[in-house]
Image (cartoon, grey):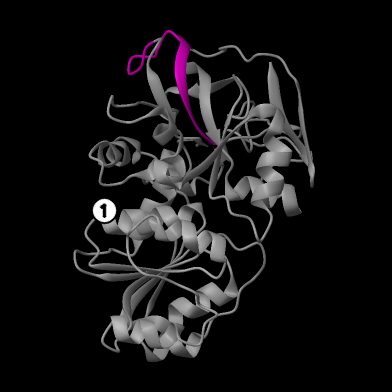
């Protein structure tokens, strides 16, 4: 089969590789329908290897070259003897985290913090940027009839967004600021709105992405570089600042804006990933009695809950998808477009069929 294989910085090759087969009774073989290109994939492409492995992963044994793709959905084509929750022909959404189940964090139910954490499409034998992938039983979830194949492929970043917002404990009626309108920022805004935020404000300096964010219709979209930015937030919040800020840009400027514009005793959650150290106004954290939280991945059991919310129509995650491309175009029409700072894409889905 053809697969997009990562060899190193700016080196992704679409090439022939062997079709994967089942080796364990708790494995599932999935034919991929759609796979998204994630910000983590882009970080690997631009400055990696980061989480892809130049030496064998201690849990999976995976090493470069790596078949990429960890945001995907598909249809079950084969199952091991121990599989009971899905059957051949079922549509499934993939939770790509691979965990040991034995470390102190796994034993506490915090698989996202597993000391031996691996990920399909980043540090495993297979990935979603190919026709087939092999998953463990706990990685596949049946898709409800009301959820499209496209939406099923977006559940992974939607779960990332949901976990960040949930970490901040957004309550009904809260005013929420989201900095950065990339895919996770857009999904964070949609999720905050879905769970009852009274007002969602999106800060995005890229005019093309800002225009896309306005189509989500969740609240005002502001340019943080404009002189009026601070005054507009003050006006929208009666001078107090927002209750919760969700930082999704992965920039020092985005984090600074969150700290500045969150009210006293409010909460800032860092969802966007930083590729280099950031600075923060620690005095402001103290003076304003702020809570500053990190957010890593998602609860591994969140898939059914997120899909149920998507099925209601209140969390329209497919709206962040802006393009569909074939596997052969994954670099020129996918990676190269998405790393362009002036680009106008949010989520690009790839099909290997």
Q: Taking 77 as reference, is 328 above or below it?
A: below
Quadrant of res 188:
bottom left
Residue 183: x and y, percent? 49, 52
Q: Is residue 287 left or right of residue 57?
A: left
- Magenta span includes 81: yes
Which image quarter is the N terminus in?
top right
- Is residue 253 shown to the viewer in this render? yes
* Whether residue 20 is situated above or below residue 51 in the rendered picture: above
Residue 74 horizontal/vertical position (percent): 47, 23
Q: Residue drawn 28% across and 24% down?
A: 145
Q: Residue 115 location, x and y as percent?
A: 54, 46
Residue found 70% across the figure and 20% down from its top: 2
Q: Is 87 rendered above or below residue 280?
A: above
Residue topped by disc 1: 194
Residue at 19%, 68% in the rendered image: 173
Q: Which one is in front, 242 or 138?
A: 242
Q: Nearer the viewer, residue 41 or 220?
A: 220
Relative image position of residue 241 (x, y in whole percent): 33, 83
Instruction: Describe residue 173's horizontal placement relative to residue 62 as left or right.
Output: left
Seen in the image, is 289 located left or right of residue 272?
left
Q: Is residue 322 left or right of residue 216?
A: right
What segment is highlighted magenta in the picture? 70-87
| Whether residue 48 can be seen here | no
Q: In front here: 78 or 173? A: 173
Which residue corresponds to the image point at 41% horizontal and 41% vertical from the top-left? 318
């Amino acid at each position: 089969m053809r697969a997009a294989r990562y060899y190193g910085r700016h080196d992704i090759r679409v090439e022939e590789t062997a079709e994967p087969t089942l080796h364990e009774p708790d494995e599932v073989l999935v034919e991929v329908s759609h796979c998204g290109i994630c910000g983590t994939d882009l970080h690997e492409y631009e400055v990696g290897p980061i989480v892809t492995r130049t030496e064998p992963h201690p849990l999976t044994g995976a090493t470069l070259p790596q078949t990429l793709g960890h945001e995907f959905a598909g249809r079950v084509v084969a199952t091991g003897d121990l599989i009971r929750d899905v059957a051949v022909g079922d549509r499934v959404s993939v939770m790509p985290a691979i965990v040991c189940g034995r470390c102190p964090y796994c034993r506490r139910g915090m698989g996202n913090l597993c000391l031996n954490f691996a990920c399909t499409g980043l540090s495993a034998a297979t990935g979603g940027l190919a026709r087939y992938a092999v998953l463990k039983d706990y990685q596949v979830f049946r898709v409800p009839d009301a959820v499209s194949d496209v939406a099923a492929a977006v559940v992974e970043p939607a779960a990332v967004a949901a976990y960040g917002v949930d970490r901040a404990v957004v309550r009904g009626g809260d005013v929420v600021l989201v900095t950065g309108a990339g895919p996770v920022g857009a999904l964070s805004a949609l999720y905050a709105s879905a769970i009852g935020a009274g007002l969602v404000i999106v800060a995005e300096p890229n005019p093309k992405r800002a225009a896309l964010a306005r189509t989500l219709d969740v609240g005002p979209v502001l340019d943080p570089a404009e002189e009026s930015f601070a005054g507009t937030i003050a006006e929208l919040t009666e001078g107090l600042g927002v209750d919760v800020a969700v930082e999704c840009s992965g920039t020092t400027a985005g984090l600074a804006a969150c700290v500045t514009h969150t009210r006293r005793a409010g909460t800032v959650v860092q969802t966007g990933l930083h590729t280099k150290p950031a600075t923060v106004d620690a005095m402001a954290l103290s003076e304003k009695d702020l809570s500053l939280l990190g957010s890593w991945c998602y609860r591994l059991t969140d898939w059914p809950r997120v899909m149920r919310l998507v099925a209601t129509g209140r969390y329209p995650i497919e709206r962040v998808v802006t393009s569909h491309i074939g596997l052969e175009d994954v670099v020129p029409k996918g990676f190269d477009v998405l790393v362009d700072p002036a680009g106008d894409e949010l989520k690009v889905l790839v099909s290997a069929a």
